[in-house]
Image: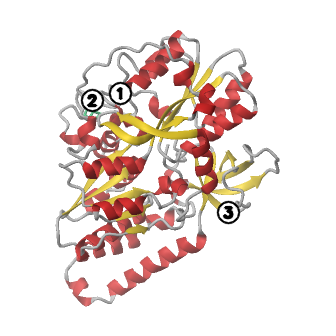
Amino acid sequence: MNWIPKKRTAESNMKYLSEFRDAALVKTLLRNINKTVTGQWNIMEVCGGQTHGLVRHGILDMLPDKIRMIHGPGCPVCVTPVSLIDKAIELCLEHNVILCSYGDMLRVPGTEMSLQKARAAGGNVRILYSPLEAVDIAKKNPDRQVVFFAVGFETTAPANALSVMQASNLKLTNYSILSAHVMVPPAMEAIMGDKETQVHGFLAAGHVCTVMGLSEYEPLVKRWKMPVVVTGFEPVDLLEGIWLVISQLEKGEYQLQNQYKRVVSNQGNRQAVELVKKVFEYRNRDWRGIGEIPLSGLFLREEFREYDAAMKFKDIKVPEAVETECLSGDIMKGKIKPPECPHFGNKCTPEHPLGAPMVSSEGACAAYYQYKMQS
Amino acid sequence: MCLAIPGKVVSLEPTSDETNRPGKVSFGGILREVNFCFLPEANVGDYVLIHVGVALSKIDEKEAMETLKYLREMGELDELDPEEENSGE
Ligand code: SF4
């Protein structure tokens, strides 16, 4: 789903990638980080994509011991409540729905099974790259209900809003979305509000800010007196972001900075935000493993309720949730690192996952498993 | 699904539909259909970031060059710093 070309060589020759993976610049930044750091600092990268970057490029091992990276809750698949997964499974198994989803969602365990198992049991589950493809499927299958499992942060919300607009323009009556959208700033607020938090500064998720711009972060910086640096995903980006955060911390400053200026502008993408606000509204949302976070979820507005699968299929019963052995909550709050989970690599593997962080492409457990176990 | 890599705009099709502005983007030679309705200012030849089939931002070449230039200069200054050389990195 991430569209990363299979061949690493082709990828690293691409413009705006290879330059930001340059070994000399990585070395320069590491040297400056080493020169700057004197205190013991904990920095949270909120986004799971950045967690993967840090692990995959070996950055965690290069950083001085004084800097501890805490992996945040930035994996939208991991925080999607079990009840929604159960609902998606129920829709395709019992209600003859064509259930469209991103590939990441496929192996995430629900209460009784995953979407993958539902597909094996005869459910019509289609793996798509974009919700716009689901609108096409709805157009071509007028006699079937098509539901898109709309999981994601601010980055995927514009495409989902657009899919609803397209369906509305086409007057489709057989398309709806199961919205599991969550927003990053309320989660950062919740993390800082947690008395046990050990976070001193944040790398904010570059691509989320691509859409939303920077304005939501200013109040967080002021209220919690902590540095926030909007950061990209390549090794040079990540190290520069870390360097900017610790430079502030060492000086006792707290500011909002933008490391990722080549992509993120102050105002974000206004057209995208406008459409998201037209289609969705903010409400409280339950985060799997973490609990409810105020005004952290996007739900379809009243005017668009006919495209809301949660309304359309209101009466669907889902199995009662059972206790799980997965420690995803502790992982996402940064309390433990994946290898510290007793199930990591034995009872819980990508083939037999106990929790979402082991199978999502942005999950922290998957990152450690792929890059650490294999090296 | 939040991750995206830069791609180059290869073609853009004219359209009057505000929810559909089709174009093609090349990712190191791999071509993909992309909807440009949130990025009307994009031109053929621009580098853009795409999320789940929708173009959301242009890569600002000037900003990219400035970041790289600044970091390279920082590296050159380091080389002139004898103390640093002695610290046996
Ligand atoms: S290793 Fe498995 S069980 Fe442990 S937290 Fe990660 S996903 Fe959950």
Q: Report the residue at 49% width, 54% height from top.
A: A207
Q: Is residue A63 above or below residue B84?
A: above
Subunit under mark 1: A
Q: Report the residue at 47% width, 18% height from top.
A: A89
Residue type pointed to by label 2 = Cys
For residue B71, what is the image quadrant? bottom left
Q: Is B6 positioned to the left or the right of B80 in the image?
A: right
Viewer-nearest residue: A129 or A300: A300
**Mark 3 falls on what kind of element?**
loop
Q: Is residue A73 above or below residue A96?
A: below
Subunit under mark 3: B
Viewer-nearest residue: A194 or A2: A194
Question: Does the rendering let one see residue A235?
Answer: no
Q: Is residue B32 above or below residue A107?
A: below
Front disc: 2 or 3: 3
Q: Report the residue at 76% width, 31% height from top.
A: A170
Disc 2 under 8 Å from ligand 1? The reply is yes
Name the residue carrying label 1: A351
Residue A180 x, y percent position in the rendering = 47, 33
Residue type pointed to by label 1 = Glu
Name the residue carrying label 2: A348
Q: Are marks 2 and 3 in contact (CB under 8 Å)?
A: no
